[in-house]
Image: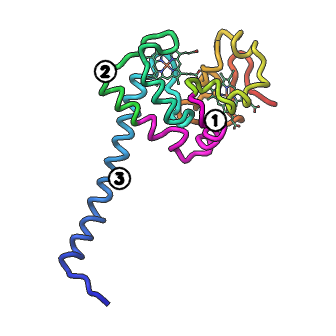
Amino acid sequence: MKTLHPRRYLAGLIWFGCVTPMIAVAAHTSNQDARTLYKEECASCHMAYPAELLPARSWQAILGKLDKHFGDNASLDSATQQRLLQYLQANSADAAATRLAQRQQRSIPAATTPLRISETAYIRRKHDEIPARLITANPQVKSLSNCIACHQGAERGVFNEHQVRIPGYGQWDD
Ligand code: HEC
Ligand code: HEC
């Protein structure tokens, strides 16, 4: 058996004891910072849509034409745009390990690049029994894009069907 030189042993201890946790903390902090930036830049006109609801290519397409963003100009400087794109892609439907991300990824054909979460097959199917009077004709909701009107936990990616409350209607029971 090879014996480990004490100095290398010590170096190993220092690496795994201090440096590795520091790297993990740094990665976590930078994801948190990016999330704060995302909420500042992308949640002034609507809610902060969870990154896991669209594939990386969709975020690229959305961030690539912010000057023509659903009829609005949502332009950002290129450094901010890059930072947000990195965050959104790292947490996208193809990267996140959540069940929601996996369902979304399966429901979006690889050859398409949806720009709207509200028009993807899985999200459409989950809402096709809700009558228009509760969505588009509901002044407190206005459109299916307004996830947070009915799902309080939407920004955290919580869409549990037992916690849905449609404004003016109450608890949804199907
Ligand atoms: C100046 C206002 C404004 C800003 C800032 C803005 N958006 Fe939007 N966004 C809109 C509008 C308007 C819509 C269309 C909403 C609707 O149809 O109800 C929209 C829709 C979206 C949708 C599609 C929602 C759906 O129907 O599924 C996504 C995704 C989105 N925005 C992402 C972003 C991201 C990412 C940023 C930040 C880089 C951002 N938005 C910043 C105005 C804005
Ligand atoms: C008008 C209120 C309303 C809006 C707006 C809305 N939802 Fe829902 N959502 C519901 C209801 C009600 C259900 C439960 C449907 C059922 O009975 O299965 C649901 C179900 C879901 C589910 C399935 C949850 C589960 O546990 O199976 C997901 C995911 C979801 N919504 C995501 C979204 C997203 C993303 C948006 C925005 C793009 C959105 N919803 C907008 C009312 C809404």
x and y percentages locating residue 160 in the rendered image? 67, 37
Mark 3 Cβ and ligand 1 under 8 Å apart:
no
Residue at image coords 70%, 16%: 135
Q: Is residue 112 magenta?
A: yes
Q: Which residues are magenta?
A: 87-113
Residue at image coords 43%, 25%: 63
- In this view of the protein, which residue sits in the foreground, 78 or 159? 78
The residue that label 1 is drawn on is 109
Nearer to us: label 2 or label 1: 1
Residue 87 found in image quarter: top left
Residue at image coords 56%, 29%: 113
Q: Regarding mark 1 in the picture, which secondary structure is present there? A: loop
- In this view of the protein, which residue sits in the foreground, 63 or 101? 63
Q: Amino acid at mark 2?
A: Asp
Q: Is residue 7 above or below residue 129?
A: below
Circle on res. 24: 3
Circle on res. 77: 2
Residue neighbourhood size for the residue with mark 1, other residues' Cα within 10 Å, grouped as few (<14), some (14–19), many (≥20): few
Nearer to us: label 3 or label 1: 1
Circle on res. 161: none
* Callout 3–callout 1 Cβ contact below 8 Å: no
Counting residues from the start of the chain, the first of labels 3 and 1 encountered is 3
Residue 78 found in image quarter: top left
User: Seen in the image, is 130 located left or right of residue 26?
Assistant: right
Q: Amino acid at mark 1?
A: Pro
